[in-house]
Image (spheres, helix red, strand yellow):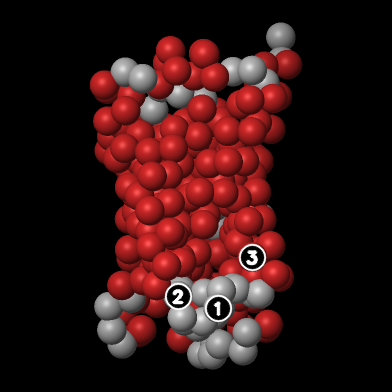
Amino acid sequence: MWGFFPLYFKLLQNVPAIEILGNRIVWSFFFLAGIISLRKDWKRMRQSALKPRTLLIYTISACLLAVNWLIYVWGVNAGFVVETSLGYFINPLLNVVLGVVFLHERLRLMQWAPVGLATLGVIYLTVNYGQLPWIALALAFSFGMYGLVKKTAPLGSLHGLTLETGILFTPATLYLLLAANRSTTGGHTPLTLLLLVGIGVVTAVPLLMFGVAARSIDLSLLGILQYVAPTCQVLLGVLVFGEPFTSVRLVGFSLIWAALIFFWVEGALHQRKVVHAASTP
């Protein structure tokens, strides 16, 4: 789902990135609050969420999420889809490092080979980019730290994301009201308004899935699997939006894709070995 986000945000290209951010927060909160209401789950959420430590953790994660959303939307609509994809290629590598350093996760010896190969690809792309790819780096670090916080956060996926958007709801609403009062263009078209409202569902559903995954599997494995989304994004950037894809980018991205294939094959072989050992008397 994340891999195809550029298609949606390009339809909102004439809307300022910070206004899109405000709408993502507000309508995501309404969508999530509706789910909790249908489940009659507000009492349980208040009991678990309204604790100082929990509020602090989710305030940090909410701020990281807001920064990531803003930079991503701006990058896509400014014509940097390929560079935003580079950010999400770097992010899984950062997740692996964070998992090993902070959560004491362990990689098998053969798992270090694809990590090293992917790192080489990212370094190659960065060095040959000609300048510091700040969009890619900002996206990688903001979402990498968000993933780390979500891994250690106490709430479930639905309650956690609702709390995050709830924390950001008031400032986002105030900004949107202020922007509406300052508008001199007569407002948005009905289609644009519909897309801005729909952004809540588009945003919340994959994030809920990510929240479940982050709590269910190792952060290092989660990181490697996240190469799928930026691969889709770079293909969209080149094939649909016509962004350049030079020979330098081809070499760097090929190293990363080879690393992903290596990691998947190694994991499949290891799992087969584990199953065989368990079934052997």
Q: Which of these two is toward me, 276 or 153? A: 153
Give the labeled residue for mark 2: 183
**Residue underneath mark 3:** 193
Sequence-first tag of 1 and 3: 1
Q: In the structure shown, which secondary structural element does the residue marked by tag 3 occupy?
A: helix
- Gap in angstroms between the C-alphas marked 1 and 3: 13 Å
Real-space Cα distance between discs 1 and 2? Answer: 7 Å
- Asked if residue 249 lies left or right of residue 66, the reply is right
Task: Check the picture and name the quadrant holding the C terminus.
Answer: top right
- Judge by depth and name the residue closer to the eye, 266 or 136: 136
Q: Is residue 54 above or below residue 86?
A: above
Could you tell me which residue is drawn at 62 percent across and 41 percent down?
31
Label 1–label 3 contact, CB within 8 A: no
Which of the two residues, 77 or 224, is positioned nearer the viewer here? 77
Q: Which amino acid does the dot numbered 3 rest on?
A: Leu
The answer to whether 228 is drawn above or below residue 252 in the figure is above
Residue at position x 63%, y 56% in the image: 197
Mark 1 residue element: loop
- Under circle 2, the secondary element is loop
- Crowding near the residue tagged with mark 2, few <14, some 14–19, many ≥20 C-alpha atoms within 10 Å: few
Percent x, y of residue 226: 54, 52
Residue type for callout 1: Gly
On the image, the x and y values in percent for residue 278 come to: 67, 16
Residue 218, visible in the rendered structure: no
Q: Nearer the viewer, mark 1 or mark 3?
A: 1
User: Which quadrant of the rendered structure holds the N terminus?
Assistant: bottom right
At label 2, which amino acid type do we have?
Answer: Ser
In the displayed structure, 85 sits above or below 31; it is below
Q: Are marks 1 and 2 in contact (CB under 8 Å)?
A: yes
| Front position among marks 2 and 3 | 2
